[in-house]
Image (cartoon, grey):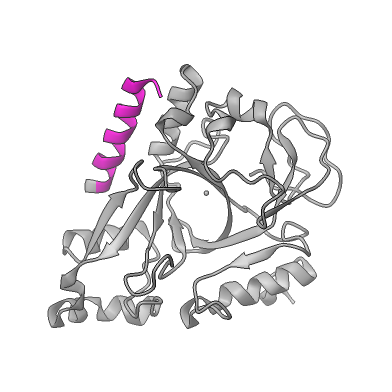
Amino acid sequence: MRIKKIINTIAAFALLAGSLVTLSSTVPAQKSNDRILDEKRPFDFADKYYGDHGVDYAQIIDRRSGFDRYSVFDYIDSDVFRGVRILETRTGYDENGKQIFWVFYGYVDRSGFTRNASGEEAIKAASNVPVYFFPSAKFRYQERQSALIDRTGDNPDKNRLSLGTAVEVEYTRKAYTKEGQRMLAELLGNNGKSLDGLPIIRTPSEIGALTRYELITQRVRSISEPGAAQFIIARTIEDPRFGAISPDAFLRFTGDGSKPIDAEAEFFQEFDCLQKSGRYCREK
């Protein structure tokens, strides 16, 4: 597909230039030089861990600091993570269209990768994981739906930082025509309406089909856009139960500010159940 060519081109350029966790539990984790399986809450990675896996921590854009409203300082005895716990939880879809929760750690541009083999491997890993964003055409600085993280081509052993490439997906003018509306009717019935009123897109195959019919465009984020470098650190919460969603965590969702859009209301409900009971609503 065209998006893979775009991503591969970026990765190749970055290499020539030399340039969403294991998430925790409430039980204190033991020190480790690799992964921590006990700690389920999302902590930021330690500076050295970033460097060991190809990213210059000082070059991360919008990295969580503990001083911002998205994170707090917290104790963790670890060589992998540092004492900054991320509060903001985001909604999304995986490559199968399943609803997921994920955590944003920051953006990285080409200069943010270390100039060695680890940096080259990190760029390759990021190019294999498109993270699709869906900017609203009607509401400025808002997304019309939750992100889609496609880890089909991911190798977790080589992508310890959960790096990806940020891709923006927008509907074309054709989508607003009678022909476009007819073509989108089935998808709208299956997936529901986004904030803009057009269908939610839940899978990479839907992105591929809509691209072929010229109903959407895909664009890798440009380095020239403030705060929106093309590479992203986006860790999926593999199992959000049993304490992964802490009492002080909060959900970032697509909606009018007070409630999510109808098609994504389940995110809000499940987050509330997970935060209060440590289980999905359906498990009660």
Q: Position of residue 87 (x, y in %)?
A: 69, 57
Drawn side of residue 30 relative to residue 161, left or right = right
Marks counted in the figure total: 0
In the rendered view, would you say 44 is above or below 263? above
Residue drawn where x is 72% and y is 73% of the image:
273
* Camera-nearest residue between 171 and 237: 171
Drawn side of residue 164 relative to residue 35, left or right = left
In the rendered view, would you say 157 is above or below 280? above
Where is residue 91, by image quadrant? Answer: bottom right
| Residue 90: in magenta span | no
- Residue that lies at the very extreme toward the top in this rendered image: 116
**Quadrant showing the C terminus:** bottom right
Q: Position of residue 256 (x, y in %)?
A: 50, 79
Drawn side of residue 18 relative to residue 34, left or right = left
Q: Position of residue 112 (x, y in %)?
A: 48, 30
Q: Position of residue 73 (x, y in %)?
A: 78, 47
Query: Does residue 65 appear in this view?
Result: yes
Residue drawn where x is 58% and y is 80% of the image:
258
Could you tell me what secondary structure mostly forms the magenta stretch? helix
Query: Does residue 1 appear in this view?
Result: no
Please state the extent of the stretch shown in magenta in the rendering.
3-19
Where is residue 209, by image quadrant? Answer: bottom left
Residue drawn where x is 62% and y is 52% of the image:
238
Drawn side of residue 217 relative to residue 33, left or right = left
